[in-house]
């Protein structure tokens, strides 16, 4: 699967998620959660100082469902999804249905080695190290 995350493709993304989820609806994802993840990860790449030309290859992982009270004792159906940054846009590359207990996992960004080096270089420009 490789679907560009744009408003034009929102119905396609919802159709895939609906097919995956079957009758489950309460804690499952919709296109808006995937769009929100792409926007949040783009902001995170900005905050790390990674130029747009070097963002291709970054991966992000998300999960629907959010947090539930600690007294919530039932298993629930949620979606896990992975998006990938290509040269100029984010793409949905995988989505699956899974059953979990408790809270959903937080979203996560995975950088390439080159992106890591850029982020570390930008970070280390902010300070100097004292000699001992």
Image (cartoon, rainbow, N blue to C red):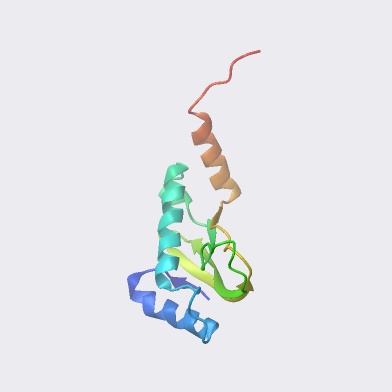
Q: Is 113 or 47 nearer to us in this picture?
A: 47
Task: Find residue 12 and report its image quarter.
Answer: bottom left
> Residue 40's image quarter?
bottom left
* Position of the C terminus by quadrant: top right
At 42% from the left edge and 46% from the top edge, which residue is drawn?
46
The residue under the point 53% across, 86% down is: 22
The residue furthest front is: 71
Residue 49 location (% of width, % of height): 45, 41
Q: Position of residue 48 (x, y in %)?
A: 47, 43
Side (left or right) of 89 relative to 66: left
So how many labels did they put on this image?
A: 0
Figure check: 65 above or below 16: above
Query: Seen from this angle, which residue lies furthest right?
Result: 132
Q: Is residue 18 above or below residue 119?
A: below
Question: Looking at this rendering, what residue extends furthest in the top direction?
Answer: 132
In the rendered image, residue 28, in percent from the top left (x then y), is placed at 50, 74
Q: Position of residue 16 (x, y in %)?
A: 48, 81
Height in image: 33 above or below 119?
below
Residue at (54, 46) in percent of width and height: 115
- Please tell me which residue is depicted at 44% across the width and 77% down the height of the picture: 13
In this view, the residue in front, 108 or 72, is 72
């Amino acid at each position: 699967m490789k679907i560009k995350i744009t408003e034009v493709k929102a119905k396609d993304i919802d159709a895939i998620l609906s097919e995956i989820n079957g009758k489950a609806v309460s804690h499952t994802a919709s296109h808006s959660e995937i769009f929100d993840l792409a926007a949040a990860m783009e902001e995170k790449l900005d905050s790390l100082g990674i130029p747009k030309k070097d963002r291709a290859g970054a991966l992000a992982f998300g999960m629907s469902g959010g947090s539930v009270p600690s007294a919530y004792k039932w298993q629930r159906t949620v979606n896990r999804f992975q998006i990938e940054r290509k040269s100029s846009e984010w793409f949905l590359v995988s989505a699956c249905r899974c059953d979990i207990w408790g809270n959903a996992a937080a979203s996560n960004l995975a950088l390439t080695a080159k992106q890591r080096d850029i982020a570390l270089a930008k970070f280390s420009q902010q300070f100097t190290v004292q000699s001992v």
